Amino acid sequence: MSAESFEKNSIGWQLSQLQKRSQEWWELQSQQLANNIDDIPGVNWNWLDGEFVELIFKVLFWLIFALLLLWGIGKLIVFLNQYFTIKNRPKNILKHNKKIAKNLKVSTWLTKANEFKQIGNFTDACLCLYMAMLQTLHDRNIAIHQFSRTDGEYLKLIQKLPQSQPYQTLLMTHQRLCFSKTKATNSLFEECYRAYQEIETQKI
């Protein structure tokens, strides 16, 4: 690629051409306006295509460009912040909760779930029910604690159970809360709580 071709493909050159074309358009419009109203006595419209107007046009052009650039950067920052928050969040929650799961009884997780519900923290309340389910699976020797085990692996294990639907409810809720922007509500907590009650009454 020649130096001239590269120059014509650069952003600076493209912006320069855009400014030039915009300025030419402005000069054409101002000239037409001046021609149309040239007959008005006592009014001089020559300033429309003067150096002062050209300066104002350049300032406005770059000001608008700068504002659009700042707006784009702002949108990009918000997007990247949301992306990395969602990306890092489940790893931290999953790693922390599974490591302490073996040290807490099912009754403790249920107590914590109710405590979080009372203060309106339905997300953590649902996650505690999820952890109670994992502890139940461990206590029943269905799925012994393995910190590296994923929800997908748990889903495969529970498929062998006679009634797997309540387990699926809690696992899928965990997925939604940790890997998306879903916000837990009281109705979602009640759904998860009913699912855990079904698990608790199952005889395996």
Image (cartoon, grey):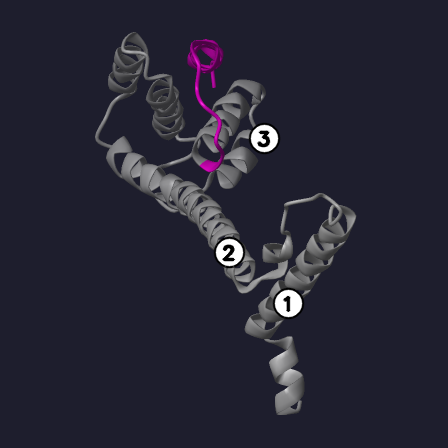
Near-viewer residue (128 or 3): 3
Query: Mark 3 against mark 1, which lies toward the viewer?
Result: 1
Secondary structure at numbered mark 2: helix
Q: Secondary structure at mark 3?
A: loop
Q: Earlier in the sequence, mark 2 or mark 3?
A: 2
**Amino acid, disc 3:** Gln
User: Which residue sits at x=28%, y=32%?
Assistant: 101
The label nearer to you, 2 versus 3, is 2
Identify residue type, mark 1: Lys
**Could you say which is closer to the camera, residue 193 or residue 162?**
193
Looking at the rendered structure, the kind of residue marked 2 is Ile
- Residue 202 colored in magenta in the image: yes
Q: Which residue is mark 3?
A: 159
Q: Residue at x 64, y 52 (%)?
A: 45
Segment tinted magenta in the rendering: 179-204
Residue 42 sits inside the magenta stretch? no
In the image, residue 83 sits, relative to residue 157, either above or below, namely below
User: How far across and how far down the image is residue 186, in percent?
Assistant: 42, 10
Circles 2 and 3, Cβ within 8 Å, touching? The answer is: no
Dot 3 or dot 1, earlier in sequence: 1
Using residue 107 as the reference point, say whether residue 184 is left or right of it: right
Q: Could you say which is closer to the camera, residue 99 or residue 91? A: 91
Who's the residue at 52% across and 60% down the image? 58
* Mark 1 lies on residue: 20
Identity of the residue furthest to the left in this view: 103
Spot occupied by residue 139 in the image (x, y as percentages of width and height) = 34, 26
Q: Residues within 10 Å of mark 1 (few under 14, many from 20)?
A: few
Examine the rendered structure and indicate whether residue 32 appears above or below residue 164. below
Mark 3 vs 1: CB contact within 8 A: no
Q: Tell me the residue that label 2 is attached to.
A: 56
Figure check: 171 above or below 46: above
Q: Residue 119, labelled with which disc?
A: none
